[in-house]
Amino acid sequence: MDFNTNNNMEYYCCYLRKSRKDMEAEAHGQGETLARHEKRLKDYADSVGIKISKFYREVVSGETISARPVMQQLLTDVENGMWTGVLVVEVERLARGNTLDQGIVSNAFQYSNTKIITPLKTYDPNNDYDEEYFEFGLFMSRREYKKINQRLHEGILSSVNEGKHVGASAPYGYKKYKLPKQKGYSLKIDEHESNMIKLIFDLYCNGNGLEFICNELNRLGFKPRRSNKFTKSSITHILTNPVYIGKIKYEDKATLKKVVNGEIVRVKNENSNIIYVDGLHKPIIDLNTWNKAQNIRKSNLTNRTKVDYSLKNPMASILKCGICGRALERITYSNRNDVRICCRKCKENIGSNINFVEERLLKSLKLLLSDYKIKIINNDDSDIISLLDINNKNIDDFKNELDKNKSQLNKTYDLLEQGIYTNEVFLERSNYLKQQIKDINEHIEELEKENKNILKRKNNKEILIPKIEKVIDSYYETDDIKMKNNLLKDVLEKVEYTKINPSDKDDFKLKLFPKIQA
């Protein structure tokens, strides 16, 4: 394929990504991977007359596209038809994930007619042979990835069973070191940090709580490695880590992959296999001290007062801050026998007693019911018509703005062809305008969707009237908070609460958003 062309409309970019194998090679002194690959691709581009306009540099070795933000940006640009071709060291750098990810990559290049260029071969996605060859390359890459993961897992288990340390860093109190004349790492005691570990166990075994231990360590000037002070959770982690009695603990398959809302995520595996073996390192804590600490902790957990997590707020998840939109929280002030509704984020939105808010909400529902009945009798849809008029005007304004942006985008192509815009200026300007067009289209879609919901409200009043009547009649007939909450949720999408004046307990506003019934 001849790349020597005078067509100024051809644009090429370069995608660089480290693999796990590259990271291992770097650890053995083979140099920085992205720099080596960049030079190789630049030399190749120069030899075939390609000018690279942009470099996409990925520094994570993610298994899926969702874990690789730079790859996501590249695919978006490819789908938008920005590039004639993408240069990579090998096709495996583009996708090593599952079949779904490989399909996403393949479709993005095929439907945008974007070529994939490597120093060994150029792939035309619309050529059946190249498409088949490309997909086969991705399949083999996925296979190799699984084999690498399997070897890594087997290597970790082997190291654990030999008593070696497999963590990325050493636990507090130890230093990590390379074992001489063999593979793997172990731990050696850090004298300064180990004194703190001994102090923690001594204080805990002598009846001191976690809060006291934190304060004492912070007062003595001890600091964790990644923060300025100790917390109760960090002390708990130390007290329960068997590494301090010379053990290696490893949780095999601690997480599992699951599909949540269409995305692959990792969740804790409740049936994971926890392995304990004697480590090669020396213990800091003797076995008697360890057992005493574990017995104290077990006793504290057994005697701990159970927290009541049952629903306490009948307006939970309905009542929102009128300033930031955040859900309001129920806060109990035991020193003044007061339960209030507050927004933890907006200090200017002042809280109120929960009983006052609940009472006002029921009164507002009664007023809403009365208003609905009057409007049905008078066949009054003025509120709906007014909202539609406002939205339609905004849609017209957005469409005018959309036409302007599309016209400006067309001009950028003319300015590029006339030589007024450089490639860099063209890309920057056209990308900005494309984003503007995308944002405006999203605004128009939102307003059109809102218009559909507004039209549904024409019939909403008649459906809601008996439901609101049921809430008003049943609300104070029950003491069940959950039932009250369900009654409110049946007729209300949300209620916005706003209070600016702190002096008057009744000076707050509630804005009701009735639920649109299907």
Image (cartoon, rainbow, N blue to C red):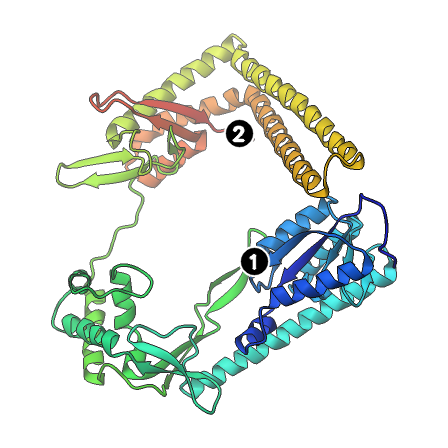
Quadrant of residue 424 within the rendered picture: top right
Q: Position of 12 compared to 202: left or right?
A: right
The three-letter code of the residue at mark 2 reads Gln
Q: Earlier in the sequence, mark 2 or mark 1?
A: 1
Q: Secondary structure at mark 1?
A: helix
Question: Residue 445: x percent and y percent?
Answer: 63, 30
Q: Is residue 295 visible?
A: no
- Which residue is denoted by mark 1 in the rendering? 67
On screen, 478 above or below 9?
A: above
Question: Residue 43: x percent and y percent?
Answer: 74, 63
- Judged by depth in the image, the label closer to the viewer, 2 or 1, is 1
Q: Secondary structure at mark 2?
A: loop
Count numbered badges in the picture: 2
- Which residue is denoted by mark 2 in the rendering? 517
Residue 437 is marked as none
Question: Residue 220: x percent and y percent?
Answer: 16, 65
- Within-10-Å neighbours for mark 2: few <14, some 14–19, many 20+: some
Q: Position of 308 compared to 390: left or right?
A: left
- Camera-nearest residue between 99 and 156: 156
On screen, 107 above or below 315?
A: below
Q: Which of the image's four quarters has the C terminus?
A: top right
- Within-10-Å neighbours for mark 1: few <14, some 14–19, many 20+: few
At a point 46% along the width and 21% down the height, the residue shown is 465
- Camera-nearest residue between 376 and 293: 293
Q: Is residue 55 visible?
A: yes
Quadrant of residue 458 within the rendered picture: top right
The three-letter code of the residue at mark 1 reads Ala
Q: Position of 263 compared to 8: left or right?
A: left
